[in-house]
Image: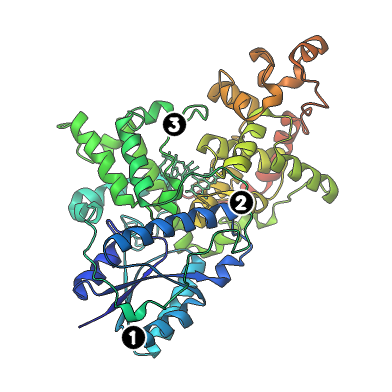
Amino acid sequence: MTIVIHWFRRDLRLQDNTALSAAARDAGGAVIPVFVLDNDLLRGADIAPARVHFMLDCLRELDATLRRHGSRLIVLRGNPAVELVRLVQRTGAEAVYFNRDYTPTALRRDARVTQTLQQAGVDVQTFKDSVIFEPSELRTGDGQPYTVFTPYKRAWLNRLSLGGRADAQPIDAPRLSALPPSWADIGLSALPTASELGFHVEQELPAGGESEGLRRLSHFKNSGALQAYAAQRDFPAIEGTSRLSPYLRFGAISPRQCFATAVSTLQREFPSKHSFSPAASDTKKEGADAWISELIWREFYAQILYHFPHANTGNYRREYDGLEWGSGNPTLDEIRFNAWRDGRTGYPIVDAAMRQLRQTGWMHNRARMIVASFLTKDLLLDWRLGERHFMQQLVDGDPASNNGGWQWAAGTGTDAQPYFRIFNPRLQSERFDPEGAFIRRWLPELERVPLEYLHAPHTMPALVQAQSGCTIGSDYPAPIVDHAVQKEESIRRFSEIAKKAKPSTR
Ligand SMILES: Cc1cc2nc3c(=O)[nH]c(=O)nc-3n(C[C@H](O)[C@H](O)[C@H](O)COP(=O)(O)OP(=O)(O)OC[C@H]3O[C@@H](n4cnc5c(N)ncnc54)[C@H](O)[C@@H]3O)c2cc1C
């Protein structure tokens, strides 16, 4: 009998798991499900206690589900290459299967693990799973990677309609055999908690796990939020988005399950009209259509980081390496960064968003764009400072999407917003939080401030400050910078470099 190890990583689910199903098929069910708590990753500078906690939740549920099927999750701790070879020797497994991960760090690790296993005579098989189309599957006519979203999306949808439907089809959970009782002592005796691993978790986090991911996906559809997505997605006070990002990040649900849900909505509501032609998708912005675009953004950023790994630590557009960051006074820059981090900038929409991040490990996409623009264009601070802070806080922190989002906002990325289009935090606030519900939710000190002053509380007359119990300068800060002045300085710095840069249209 062939025994195959399935190495779980960013695919913490049983349903629609490509490598797991292949392992079950090839081994007739004799699969050893294993997860390795990788010491290098746990000690990494970008680790977030919130993500460790969420991941352990997912693992706990995965183990419980496997046990219901008569199997169990073997949890090892250490270096994956060493631990997997040891597991092969102990169990007599002939092969290790896993789903591919495209980030630079994961690619390096996987190359090392594969080499070690192959040298030990073990067959290694890897599979596409975390995306519908892999970075190598979509290329421009001249064989180059796409660097602009719209043509990438067009190519993605074209590929889907031209024979790629199977790539987007979810598959059922496989049948797995029970592990022999003689292996009962393999692995940790119990899954550790985040605090046992040395992480102090302060945020109120969503429950992790496959069943919760699936429940949220059907709620998103059944509540009508998916259908209303295009109209509601930009308003942070509304529960208008799916909140599925941590589940997609850890593979508690798959992009195919999300895509199939969106498609079933489109087919039911627009049975004859929707053909997945790029033109149809560009012109009709129904909710499910707009949501599919976001799933494609996720794959767009995954392929950018794969093809341009220098963007992991540096500007995608290298010409911006010469850009001057900061005020010239490191102490002032530190004070400003801390004010941004703590939600004390005097710009309520920025502060509300940063407090949402601190308290929940998640932030609404519109708010992410606003705070990233504020850090890089109003405080003139290096986007990498914000990127790292997000990675250390976000429950959905994903190297490719986070890097892509930050470089987009900073204007240093592939498909960046033009450097001269700088978000005005007050106008963003008035437009996307018109009733001030998001601000009041996260900034209790502004709760009684009248709406006419809520987006710019420093303009409140002294009497109104007294009536609303919010004195500017003590209860809530005055703006730490003047947006108009900072905007001009940002444009000056960027335009000097942009003059020499060539636009990309791929
Ligand atoms: C500065 C910045 C940093 C970001 N960092 C991350 C990150 O670390 N991890 C992360 O998953 N997303 C990141 N995003 C993208 C986006 O903000 C989140 O994916 C989204 O807010 C998650 O909420 P949701 O699940 O309700 O999304 P929905 O609106 O319901 O979208 C569904 C899914 O599509 C994907 N998605 C949506 N928008 C984007 C986008 N702009 N780019 C890439 N994928 C997207 C996500 O997987 C999301 O769960 C970042 C955006 C910015 C501007």
- Label 3 C-beta lies within 8 Å of the nearest ligand 1 atom: yes
Name which residue type carries label 2.
Answer: Val
Name which residue type carries label 3.
Answer: Arg
Give the quarter of the image for residue 44. bottom right
Point out the tag, 2 or 3, that comes first from the N-terminus: 2
Name which residue type carries label 1.
Answer: Val
Q: Residues within 10 Å of mark 1 (few under 14, many from 20)?
A: many
Describe residue 432's horizontal placement relative to residue 327 as left or right: left
| SS class, disc 1 | loop
Per the image, the residue denoted by label 2 is 201
Q: Position of residue 398 (x, y in %)?
A: 50, 54
Give the quarter of the image for residue 377. top right
- Mark 2 and mark 3 residues within 8 Å of each other at the beta carbon: no
Point out the tag, 1 or 2, that comes first from the N-terminus: 1
Spatial separation of the CA atoms under disc 2 and disc 3: 28 Å
In the image shown, does 150 or 1 lie closer to the viewer?
1
Disc number placed over residue 449 in the picture, else none? none
- Mark 1 and mark 2 residues within 8 Å of each other at the beta carbon: no
Q: Nearer the viewer, mark 2 or mark 3?
A: 2
Q: Which residue is pictured at 48% across the width and 50% down the height?
A: 504
